[in-house]
Amino acid sequence: MSLYRAIIFLLLFIAPPPLKPPILRIACGAQIGRGVSIGWFSTLMGRHISIGDYSAIRALTIINCGGNLSIGRYSIISSFTLIYGADGLRIGDHCYIGPQSLINTEEEVRIGHRSALGARCMLYTHGSFFPYSEGYWVRFAPITIGNRVWCATGVFLHPGTTIGDNSFVNSRSVVSGEIPPDSIVEGNPARMIGSMSRMQRTITPRRLDAIAEQMLHHFLVITATQGTFR
């Protein structure tokens, strides 16, 4: 990171949330959409920064990518998340990154549309510690998560992991290699235990009305008790 970018990185950390989007636009040439919010003591940096409309980076989150940083529309990165590495991060629309997650971007990480990571998920694109020059192993590879993928709390993804569209990874699973689309996987090491299409229920119009009523009730409870989503 150049000295100039390091100064901007620190300035963003201490700046009040309303000032962070304009600082990024002016100082970094970032493309920041409408209604974007960046919380207290959060900061971010990338070679090129793009954040879509109404996305949010919650308080106390650090993002430092050597490559491009792209966040789609209506996506949320929760508090206490750490994202860092020499390459970039691409997050689609309507995505959610849970609190205390860690995403290493030594190689590129891609997350498709309407996908989510639960709290305390870890994504590593490198695996090495012992000296490579002494014959020990080293692994660097990108991670790709497809569209409509849910990784529940505490999932660990190894370098080179690819998860196909419309899949679910159960809590505390350790995943490596390629997961086919429409999969349900769990365990250490993670193994396929079913398909999403077989688990999906048929929704009748009456059931759909009941679901909508339930969602509206929860929405009213949340807004009444918290008053805000920020």
Image (cartoon, grey):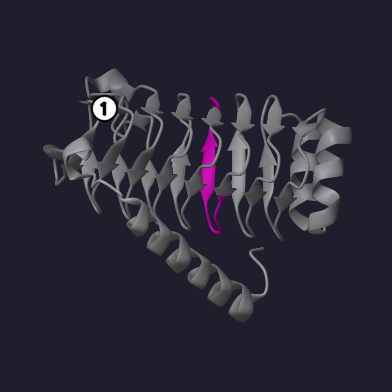
Specify few, some or many for label 1: CA neighbours under 10 Å numbering under 14, 14-19, or 20 or more. some
How far across and down, in percent of the image, does residue 29 sit?
82, 28
**Left or right of 114, for residue 34:** right
How far across and down, in percent of the image, does residue 227 sit?
67, 74
Residue at x 61% of width, y 44% of height: 74
**Badge 1 amino acid:** Pro
Give the structural element (helix, strand or loop) at label 1: loop
Residue under numbered circle 1: 181
Which stretch appears magenta?
Answer: 77-88
Residue 35 visible? The answer is yes
Residue 15 visible? The answer is no
Q: Residue furthest front?
A: 206
Reply yes or no: does residue 79 show up in magenta. yes
Compared with 112, 12 (above or below) is: below
**Left or right of 161, for residue 27:** right
Q: Please tell me which residue lies in front, 26 or 140.
A: 26
Dividing the picture into quadrants, the one containing residue 3 is top right
Residue at x 50% of width, y 72% of height: 217
Reply yes or no: does residue 90 show up in magenta. no
Q: Please tell me which residue lies in front, 96 or 13.
A: 96
How far across and down, in percent of the image, does residue 67 sit?
60, 24
**Left or right of 28, for residue 108:** left
